[in-house]
Image: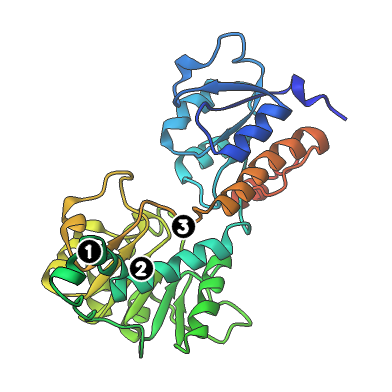
Amino acid sequence: MKDLKSVSVLMPARFYDRAAERNLDAFDAVLIDRPDPALIPADKRETITGMAALLNPDWVPVIDALPSLEIISNFGVGYHPVPSLHAIGKGICVTHTPDVLNEEVADTAIGVLLNTLRRFDQAGQWVRDGKWETVGNFTPSPLTLRGRTVGLFGLGRIGKAIARRIEGFGLPVHYHARRRVEDVPYEYHPTLTGLTEAVDTLICIVPGTPETRHAVNAGVLEALGPDGVLVNVARGSVVDEKALIAALRNGTIAAAGLDVFEDEPYVPADLMEMENTFLTPHIGSGSAHTRAAMGDLVADNLVSWFEKGEAVTPVPEAKKKGLAKRP
């Protein structure tokens, strides 16, 4: 068995607890405060063979500065295409953390949907501000889950988990994906606009890719209709935020619940000021239980790579390129 303490792994100085703990224990961990090649110790540049990070385009120069890099273990089931495909193009394996967060993100989607419809956050603030006692009852929510038809943009592992929960509310489920999914009872629509014409509630759960960028545009929102509700727990890039703001402002749709945004952590003031939005700071998988499981998988991928010569959960593009096993 390889002595993992002889393996140098780069990771952010402030990283998710479980991943940080296990990588610090297992490897010769090299920590940097931010993705800047200048921060990498000169005597480590040639020897770093592994990396753990939540990838974004800022990491591309770091990747290029590490000539011996073999594997990047990404924290999250979603992975930014720019650094990920750049690394894969250089023959570097990229992994992610699928499955361990499916149920948590599905729970979040339902929570965001219910809060968007019923304004529980505003009702809770009404109590905290003392208005129940001084002003009176909170105004009944104008929207309800009752009688809705839900469309899922994406029907992968998390999408299916959301669909099961929607079924539990006794509501019909429709979906749009790149292709029809076998062995599901839900109605398939070959176009996103076709889906939104058939439903009044749209939940987005697709990867953030060039193909899905701004897929939810003005036309899609118009098709959703004036009683329409949008929930996005996918990636901020999937929704055209300017079109969404306009649609919320002019009544094209009724409300939106967003856990993700185009330029995180920046959130447009227009969205924050509207009463018909429910906003959370990208917490889809944000329980201690699930984040620990994700951290374990980040470490498991690195340990397996250097001990067994293969990744546990390579991203599909890496697997397709034959990069799931160590040369």
Helix, strand or loop at label 3? It is loop
- Whole-Å distance between the Cαs marked 2 and 1? 11 Å
The x, y position of residue 76, in whole percent, is 54, 48
Q: Is residue 281 visible?
A: yes
The mark nearer the N terminus, 3 or 2, is: 2
Please tell me the numbered disc located at residue 284: 3
* Amino acid residing under circle 2: Val
The x, y position of residue 91, in whole percent, is 63, 35
- The answer to whether residue 148 is left or right of residue 54 is left
* Amino acid residing under circle 3: Gly
Helix, strand or loop at label 2? It is strand
Q: Which residue is mark 2?
A: 231
Q: Residue furthest right?
A: 1
Please tell me the numbered disc located at residue 17: none
Please tell me the numbered disc located at residue 244: 1
**Residue located 67% across and 17% down the image:** 47
- Up/down of 56 relative to 32, above or below: below
* 314 and 124: which is toward the camera: 124
- Whole-Å distance between the Cαs marked 1 and 3? 20 Å
